[in-house]
Amino acid sequence: MDLILLGAPGAGKGTQGAILAERLGIPKIATGDILRDAVRRDTELGRRAKAFMDAGELVPDEIILGLIREVLASPEAADGAILDGFPRTTAQAEAVGELLNRLGRRIDAVIVIEVPGDTIVRRMSGRRTCSNCGRVYNVYTEPPETEGVCDVCGGELMQRSDDQEETVRHRLQVYQSTTQPLVRFYETGGVPIRRIPGDRPIAEVQESILRELDH
Ligand code: AMP
């Protein structure tokens, strides 16, 4: 099964995608995670992407398309994947379609997690991520037991550099103008769209997703 998770930054794609991946037994692939890792390791990819990410802009397609080709061809994704944070542009959507087509696959459904803009800004300014295992917390709604420390692995919790309020607002605009239109793109292409209200507790959102996927 190949699924796309769409939704504004901070809608909960990463959180829901991780739970869903475990339940369905297919990996979640997030271009944002791959890019952040590349920035941390200061690779060629990271050096090319960093300024765009810090500014809340999309990394240009000429960089992302190669990355998408690589991840979809990896053995990890051989039996399907949950795509988190890509495609984000029409060119990326076309590339994903072609690549899957070549593998005899197609997008089975697009899950759109819908959350109002003001909720997003609050959520993201409270977001903290474990620098070691990647688990996500929120200082307002889902704090760790000990401030600044991951419950799971004891790693240090960090705030993403692009989670500052101004950058978040810009990322929301970019989502609305460039990525949201992909819902129509897939609808027109006959791909099932599953709209999930995301302004609810994590477990409830997850149940809705599973129900919509008939699981
Ligand atoms: P995310 O973790 O998905 O919110 O991504 C963080 C940042 O990485 C975005 O604001 C973009 O700068 C960049 N990024 C991640 N995925 C993509 C993509 N598919 N296309 C372009 N830029 C991306």
Image (spheres, rainbow, N blue to C red):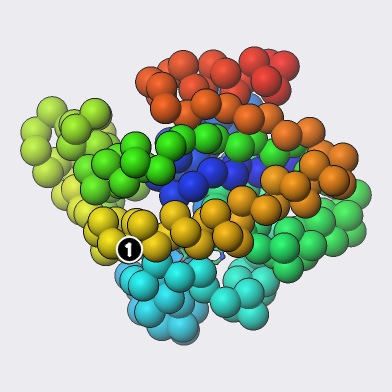
The spot of residue 120 in percent (x, y) is 36, 42
The amino acid type, in three-letter code, at marker 1 is Thr
Q: Which residue is mark 1?
A: 167
Return the residue nearer the eye: 71 or 87: 87
Percent x, y of residue 202 = 41, 24
Confirm or reject: label 1 Cβ below 8 Å from ligand 1: no
- Give the x, y percent position of residue 205: 49, 22
Residue found at the very far left of the displayed protein: 147
Which residue is at 44% across, 55% downward?
172
Dot 1 falls on a residue whose secondary structure is helix
Is residue 8 positioned above or below 74 on the image? above
Which residue occupies 46% across, 35% down?
A: 115
From the viewer's perspective, tell me whether residue 12 is left or right of residue 68: left
Q: Quick check: can you spot residue 8?
A: yes
- Quarter of the image that includes the N terminus: top right
Q: Place residue 99 in its image quadrant.
A: bottom right
User: Is residue 136 shown to the viewer in this render?
Assistant: no
The structure residue drawn at horizontal position 38% and vertical position 20%, both measured from the top left corner, is: 201
Q: Position of residue 204 (x, y in %)?
A: 46, 16
- Determine crowd level at label 1: few under 14, some 14-19, many 20+ residues with C-alpha closer than 10 A: some
